[in-house]
Image (cartoon, rainbow, N blue to C red):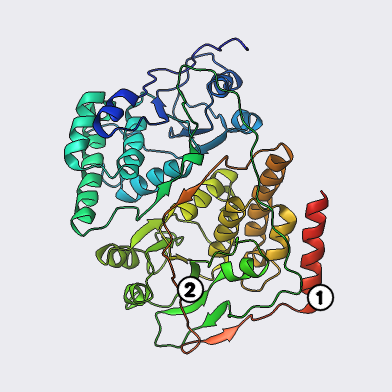
Amino acid sequence: MAQEPANPFMNMNHPCGSAKKIHGHEPQTVFSGHIKPDVKSEDAVAYLKYHGYRSIVNIQESWEKEYVDLAAAANAAGICCVNLPCPKVDGEGMHEDKFTINLAHVTGLVLLGLPRPSMIMCRSAKRASAIWFFSHAVKHDLTSAQVMMLTADAGLPFVGDAPLLYWVARFMMQADEQRNRNRRIFGDIKVSAASELPAWSPTKHIEPEAEKFKSHPFASGRQRSTPDRYEMPGTCPFATVVFPGRVAQSFGYTEGKVPQTAFGTLRRVEGAVDWLTTHKFRAVLNLLPSDEEHFEALESAAQEAGLQHLHIPLPCPDNAGAEEVYTLNQARIVALSVLGLPRPLMIVSKQMHRASAAWVIAHATRYDLKSAEVEALSLAPEVNYRECPTLEKWVAAYMAEADKAQAEKRKVLGKIDIIGQEVEDWSIDLAAHGDRTGLLLGAAAVATAGAAVLLARRS
């Protein structure tokens, strides 16, 4: 057995005993402070690898003195690493403009989706303990009374920081409000046992297991019995609605499941939430930047109606400097968010290019697709991200990581199995309300797609 590396983390905290006492489950998520001085990133990752950790969430901001970028070392070791900056604030006040409920939702949802065991790290473990709390409280649907007992018993560090404590309190107020309406704050999301390691302990040495991959037979000569894209009449708040999963279903990539994700180009906010609730949608992923039209009104209307609303602002890919935002880290955040949100899910962006790219990244992650299979999907006119060079590069870079991971017998984001957020027997028929477009690919495109998939299998 390899010699155990020295613990490189400050203030490591594994609140397993307290959590098990309160609700009977021992979590596989640990939070800590920063890496000790003079410790190399490779050594820190080696410690995590030795103990079986499968993901890292670094919530420090890059300007912080103690910040260490672990992404390269983690990727080389087959550990999924996500950087989710959580503000480090000084001075008086509760800083509600920085510690937003949306940030709590994004961080909590991403952490729920990551494979475990997982390490959350920041400077002093205070912010990390709050992030751990968000995912843990949602995963186990804790009541306020259970939260108070857990917080007191575990001695969670965020309690000593007024802005963080107020942030957690506001989150729990929203969770309680949803519970009073017989709803859960993230819907019916569940994480199966496959996302955790059996009998894991933070003090034991764990040997890594080989990953199992899905196979996807290419449906040659594909035909679609239902349209994928609808141009909606002026009376509809959405100008266009696309069902990209039906394209993937016709290729045989969805294991026979009926897709429950759509894109929408928002024409106006008025009536949009009513339209979504009428058609039984349960969540909205808003990719519009905060300064784009419709953003704030859509958020408040969705929350009032009980729709799960998540905002991940992605700038127009044609803007100067946009490539700095479209990173591998951002792709991981988007993928985990799409996979974790309740469905039926509507993804909103301006011309649906960003929504298309986000869906492709999440879909490829869920079904273990390779670059050539994504190339086949992108030939469909409904999957239009390739019209923007920045988005095309973004997806290609992520898929290069996915190909590399599969070549090394692992998954690009590790073993993820999120269940429970889909609705049984959901269907939607817009044939009577919109013009149907994009029904079939041309014969040449289908042949090209088939050749691409065959090439992927041989590689």
Mark toward the start of the polypeptide (2 vs 1): 2
Judged left or right of residue 345, residue 178 is left
444, above or below 104, in the image: below
Q: Distance from label 2 to label 1 (Cα)?
A: 29 Å
Residue 122 visible, this orientation: no
Q: Foreground: 401 or 364? A: 364
Q: Is residue 118 left or right of residue 372?
A: left
In the image, 69 versus 201, the foreground residue is 201
Mark 2–mark 1 CB contact (< 8 Å)? no
How far across and down, in percent of the image, does residue 29 sit? Answer: 41, 31
Up/down of 106 relative to 378, above or below: above
Q: Residue at x 52, y 21 (%)?
A: 51
Identify the residue position indicated by label 1 in the image.
444
Give the amino acid at mark 1. Answer: Ala
Q: Position of residue 31 (x, y in %)?
A: 39, 27
Q: Which residue is mark 2?
A: 265
Residue at x-position 57% and y-position 85%: 436
How many numbered marks, from 0 up?
A: 2
Q: Determine if residue 111 is in view.
A: yes
Q: Quadrant of the N terminus?
A: top right
Q: Secondary structure at mark 1?
A: helix
Q: What percent of the width, then of the height, locates residue 158?
A: 27, 30
| Residue 228 at x, y percent in the picture | 58, 76
> Looking at this view, is 54 or 401 the one in front?
54
For label 2, the crowd category at 10 Å Cα-Cα, with few meaning under 14, some 14 to 19 and many 20 or more, is many
Quarter of the figure with residue 284: bottom left
